[in-house]
Amino acid sequence: MAMKRMVLEIGMGTDIRGADYTKAAVRALRDALWHNSLNVAAALNMDTDAMVVDVRIGVPKPELVDKAQVLAVLPHGTGTVTCVEGGLEIFNDSGTGSTVLAHAAAIVRLDIANAEKA
């Protein structure tokens, strides 16, 4: 298997008032994905489900992200989600609530050896 990095997509998502890390992470991945139309698989005569996507999410408290909900955003292919410390949390003046900012990177890989045989 000759997995080759084909695309890097990046995005940002927020939860303005709820401090919901998963909601911010899902929005970040959608931001990364929904601004693109990837034709690379078709150009290589491969099915879009052949894509393998490495999703990386940066938030201040990575353990609060439901990775399964983030992974469910992917419209094609298979993937993994890794959450790391990053992003930003901004507390309101009274300290009773906050806004969470998440950053997402989606690294798309394809097995080029299979494309050459197609």
Image: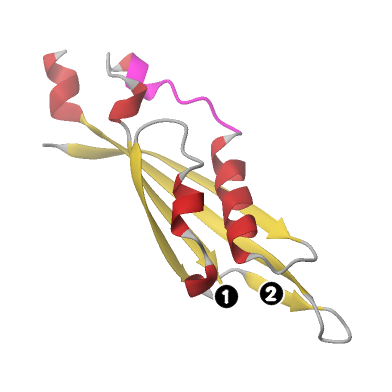
Q: Measure how far apart labels 2 and 1 are at the Cα level.
A: 7 Å
The residue sitting at 44% across, 65% down in the picture is: 83
Q: Is residue 21 depicted above or below 5 in this figure? A: below
Label 1: state its secondary structure: loop
Q: Amino acid at mark 1?
A: Pro
Q: Camera-side residue: 57 or 3?
A: 57
Is 95 left or right of 109, judged from the image as shown? Answer: right
The span shown in magenta is: 35-42
The residue sitting at 44% across, 53% down in the picture is: 68
The label number, if any, that marks residue 60 in the structure image: 1
Expressed as whole percent of the image width and height from the top left, the position of residue 2 reads 14, 37
Is 96 left or right of 42, judged from the image as shown? Answer: right
Q: Earlier in the sequence, mark 2 or mark 1?
A: 1
Is 83 left or right of 26, judged from the image as shown? Answer: left
Q: Is residue 67 depicted above or below 3 in this figure? A: below
Q: Is residue 36 depicted above or below 18 in this figure? A: above
Q: Would you identify the image quadrant in which residue 78 lies?
A: top left
| Proximity of marks 2 and 1: CB atoms separated by less than 8 Å | yes
Label 2, residues with CA under 10 Å away: few <14, some 14-19, many ≥20 = many
The label number, if any, that marks residue 89 in the structure image: 2
